[in-house]
Image (cartoon, rainbow, N blue to C red):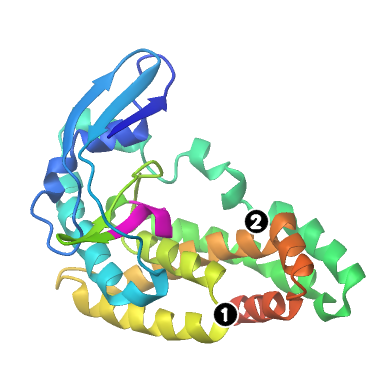
Amino acid sequence: MEKSIRKLGFVSSLEASFYRERHLFADSIHFQHPPCHALIDTPWESLIFIQFVEGKAPHLHAIAEKIARGIAEIESVSRQHLRDSSRIQGLKHWRMDFFRLWYLLRPRFNFSRLLPSVRALATQDTRFAGLEAQLRPFIAQVRENARAAQRSPRCYCHMDYLRKNLFVSEQGLHLIDWSEVKVGRVGFDGGAYLSAVFRRNNMLRFRQVSEEFLTAYSQALTDDADRSLAIANVRYVFLLNSLWYCMRPQTIAEYSRTENLNELREKFEYLLTLKVV
């Protein structure tokens, strides 16, 4: 299977940069990674040739424990790899770091810009009255979470745990499409997975999956991992993604169209429980 990624000049795309080091996951137990047979960089694009594997997409909520163990394994292996990298590799990893300004400026990492949409919703539906003021403290909280996360151990993070990027075959659970890959921090992928489950399920199912995932993830972390720090980073990325999702005008319009604003309000109520007083 061929994948073409547009790029600028001779700067390799993030995904191509990652695939040059993907051998470190060759012995993975919990996630299967389809082999990369060739990687070609031209001045205009990166061409990645990956083995095609047949399978079916799983339901995200049904594989929480498998995802937890797979994420913990990726973090453990890549954390050591990044620690031992050369100076040349280090420059590439610096460019791929989640906390580079050119990534942090992306709209989905700036939920504060969406507060006006919550204010507008409150004028149309009294169930959301006062919600904007309740959400504002998250701006400072998430900023502080980011500072703490930046000091934590680095690792490779997939960051895009959508159903289309996971599938099951006879060989096991495959994780594909690393187009959003970053040098992130321990716990980031856990937050990305839980925010994907949060978006697509009601609160009852989400709470069940969240508890199942966090228990399995904590147990799967290696002895040298800081569990409290990893869980804090899970919550940081979960908040970052979920606040953005719930506050988007597109999300509000969709819940309004399906006459399901009660569920959206429930999601906001859950997010408010994560606010540090």
Does residue 161 show up magenta in the picture?
A: yes
Q: Relative to the observer, which residue lies in front, 7 or 145?
A: 7
**Residue at point 38% right, 41% down?**
179
Q: Please, what is the three-letter code of the amino acid marked with disc 2?
A: Phe
Residue 252 visible in rendering: yes
Does residue 235 show up magenta in the picture?
A: no
**Quadrant in the rendering for residue 255:** bottom right
**Residue at point 85% right, 76% down?**
129
**Residue at point 53% right, 44% down?**
104
**SS at mark 1?**
loop
Residue that carries the numbered disc 1 in the rendered image? 202
250 sits left or right of 53 in the view = right
**Quadrant in the rendering for residue 63:** bottom left
- Sequence-first tag of 1 and 2: 2
270 sits left or right of 67 in the view = right
**Quadrant in the rendering for residue 120:** bottom right
Q: Relative to the observer, which residue lies in front, 54 or 173?
A: 54
Q: Relative to the observer, which residue lies in front, 47 or 155?
A: 47
The tag on residue 105 is none
Q: Please, what is the three-letter code of the amino acid marked with disc 1?
A: Asn
Q: Is residue 193 above or below residue 228?
A: above
Q: CA distance from mark 1 to mark 2?
A: 22 Å
Q: Residues within 10 Å of mark 1 (few under 14, many from 20)?
A: some
Q: Which image quarter holds the N terminus?
A: top left
Residue furthest to the left? 27
236 sits left or right of 226 in the view = right
Q: Can you give x and y, in whole percent of width and height, for residue 185 in the image? A: 34, 56
Residue that carries the numbered disc 2 in the rendered image? 111
Q: Is residue 48 above or below residue 199?
A: above
Residue segment shown in magenta = 158-167
Q: Can you give x and y, in whole percent of width and height, for residue 106 in the image? A: 57, 42
**Residue at point 22% right, 57% down?**
74
